[in-house]
Image (cartoon, coloured by chain):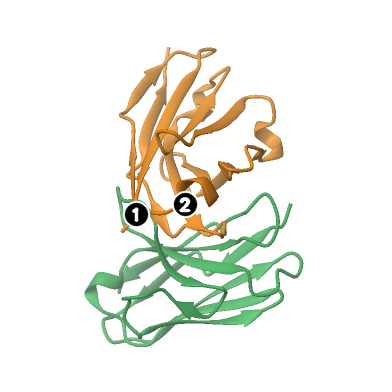
Amino acid sequence: QVQLVQSGAEVKKPGSSVKVSCKASGGSFSTDAISWVRQAPGQGLEWIGGIIPLLETAHYTQKFQGRLTITADESTSTAYLEVNSLRFEDTAVYFCARGTNTWRGENWGQGTRVTVTS
Amino acid sequence: DIQMTQSPSTLSASVGDRVTITCRASQSISSWLAWYQQKPGKAPNLLIYEASTLESGLPSRFSGSGSGTEFTLTISSLQPDDFATYYCQQYDSFPYTFGQGTKLEIK
């Protein structure tokens, strides 16, 4: 059974950066499709980007182009999401999800709450 | 980007009811559609993939249908545990957009 464990909650100031981790156990991390999905308070799910670790190339939603960096470390089976130039509206729970040879979210992390506040 | 539109946004129903949620894509996505259930404070849980395949271990009262641009999720006989929010997601092309969600409430 694949498990994804994310890093803990973060409180950040506007203009700063945050890096969230997602460690996988089980599965074939290198060939998995890892997605990052965010959910603002009281809102729906928003796919923001993803990566297949073996291919190293990350894909991003256009609205976040330039502010997001998604990476993966195959040696530790850990994916990372870095958000730069944080804004109040980036306050959300950020989820990682993975799929075996598919971009659908077969397994999900528990979510990481990121609060942007002055 | 492909836009996914769910209806209704809110659905009130009773235990034992049959309910249907609709998801429309702004362009054809073949059968590359997933349905998720999410409960408050929890991560989403995959229910249906490739439009009509039930995820392993889930009860058969959940079913999905459709292809192209029109899809439905049906729950044949609502159970108390089914009251949650449901999302569709297309995984045909980047970015892999979600519908806005349907909140299923107890009548």
Q: Return the disc, 1 or 2, that comes first in the chain's sequence.
A: 1
**Label 1 crowd (10 A; few <14 / some 14-19 / many >=20):** some
Residue pictured at 33% horizontal, 86% vertical:
B17
Which residue is under mark 2? Answer: A98
Kindly indicate the quadrant of the structure image that contains residue B3. bottom right
Most foreground residue, B71 or B32: B32
Chain to which mark 2 belongs: A
Evaluate if marks 1 and 2 touch, with contact meaning CB atoms under 8 Å apart: yes
Residue pictured at 62% horizontal, 53% vertical:
B96
| SS at badge 2 | strand
Q: In which quarter of the image is the C terminus of chain B?
A: bottom left
In the figure, B10 relative to A67: above or below? below
Q: Which chain is green?
A: B
Which residue is under mark 1? Answer: A2
Kindly indicate the quadrant of the structure image that contains residue B92. bottom right
Q: Where is residue A32 in the image (x, y as percent from the top left)?
A: 51, 51
